[in-house]
Amino acid sequence: MRKEYDFSKAKRGAVVPAPPGKTRITIRLDSDLLDWFKQQVHAAGGGNYQTLINSILRDYVEGEKEQLEATLRRVIREELKRAS
């Protein structure tokens, strides 16, 4: 090892940049929750627990959108019946 290193041309930040459309964040999760995600990935034969978390969050959000759309359609149908 050297006594000194020259970091004058070094850059701060992630070693591997996040792919387009992704944002690097820090999030605190309960340890047991994180362990569950890691176990699911391990049981499936490998993968990335962060990708699994992202997928589950996306499914939840899209499910909420579908529920909202169904509710709006029902309300609109009811209002159209009342108006006619």
Image (spheres, helix red, strand yellow):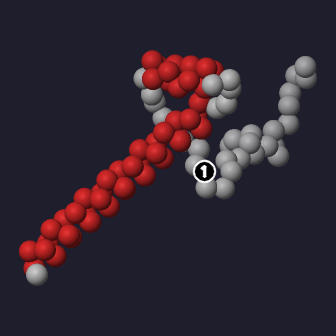
- Residue 43 image position (x, y, % from top left): 61, 20
Seen from the viewer's position, the closer of residues 20 and 24 is: 20
Q: Amino acid at mark 1?
A: Lys
Q: Is residue 24 above or below residue 4?
A: below
Residue drawn at (45%, 23%) of the image: 33
Residue 31 x/y as whole percent: 46, 19
Residue nearest the viewer, comparing 8 with 28? 28
Q: Is residue 1 visible?
A: yes
**Neighbourhood count class around disc 1 (C-alpha, 10 Å): few under 14, some 14–19, many 20 upward:** few
At 21% from the left edge and 70% from the top edge, which residue is drawn? 76
Which residue has dot 1 on it?
22
Q: Percent position (x, y) of residue 53? A: 52, 36
In the visual, does 24 lie left or right of 76? Answer: right
Query: Viewer-proximal residue, 83 or 51?
Result: 83
Under circle 1, the secondary element is: loop
The location of residue 17, given as percent across then percent down, is 71, 47
